[in-house]
Image (tube, helix red, strand yellow):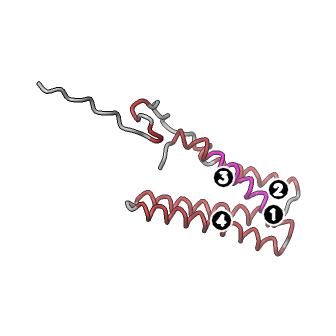
Amino acid sequence: MPETSPTPPSRGLAGTSASSSPSRPAGVPAVLRWLDLVVLVIALPVFLAAGLPLAGYLVGGLAWLAQRLVQLAVARRAKAADDPRTIVGLTAGSMILRGWMVALSIFLVGLGDNDAGLAAAVLVISLFTIYFAMQLALRPIEGPG
């Protein structure tokens, strides 16, 4: 009987053995995945109590929601695509579009009212910081894709 060499384990990211990685948790609580939107809702009473311009909250919040919707739609399309160039193009184009959408919204509301523009900018920067931190924290748990 001829000797066969053992099949090497499949490799995961960064050359680690896929079979040696710990099993992933069943799921991440939705509140963590959508924490930026939870903070957006909590920000309304803060805006009201602090007397901050509601135009800043509305424009910043709507711009944030719009860019998140664009992100979700593009992510679904990219996930369904087979061509890596299509995936990269969709992802990169989405990032540029979403950044410009939010920046123009803040700029336009700021033209009409400096305080509203500042409030919108602080709101969006806060939401982005929370969103980005959650993406970094949850990526190892949820895995790519």
Q: Which quarter of the rendered picture does the N terminus lie within?
A: top left
> How far apart are labels 2 and 3 at the CA level?
15 Å
> How far apart are labels 3 and 1 at the CA level?
17 Å
N-term-proximal mark, 2 vs 3? 3
The segment highlighted magenta reads 119-134
- Vertical arrangement, residue 94 with respect to residue 10, above or below: below
> How far apart are labels 4 and 3 at the CA level?
17 Å
N-term-proximal mark, 2 vs 1? 2
Q: Amino acid at mark 3?
A: Leu
N-term-proximal mark, 4 vs 2? 2
> How far apart are labels 2 and 1 at the CA level?
7 Å
Q: Residue at x 68, y 64 (%)?
A: 62
According to the picture, the residue beneath numbered tag 3 turns out to be 37
According to the picture, the residue beneath numbered tag 1 turns out to be 54
Q: Amino acid at mark 2?
A: Phe
Q: Is residue 132 a member of the stretch shown in magenta? A: yes
According to the picture, the residue beneath numbered tag 2 turns out to be 47
Mark 4 crowdedness (10 Å alpha carbons): few <14, some 14-19, many ≥20: some
N-term-proximal mark, 4 vs 3? 3
N-term-proximal mark, 1 vs 4? 1
Left or right? Give the position of 132 relative to 142.
right
According to the picture, the residue beneath numbered tag 4 turns out to be 99
Q: Residue at x 73, y 63 (%)?
A: 60
Quadrant of residue 116 within the rendered picture: bottom right
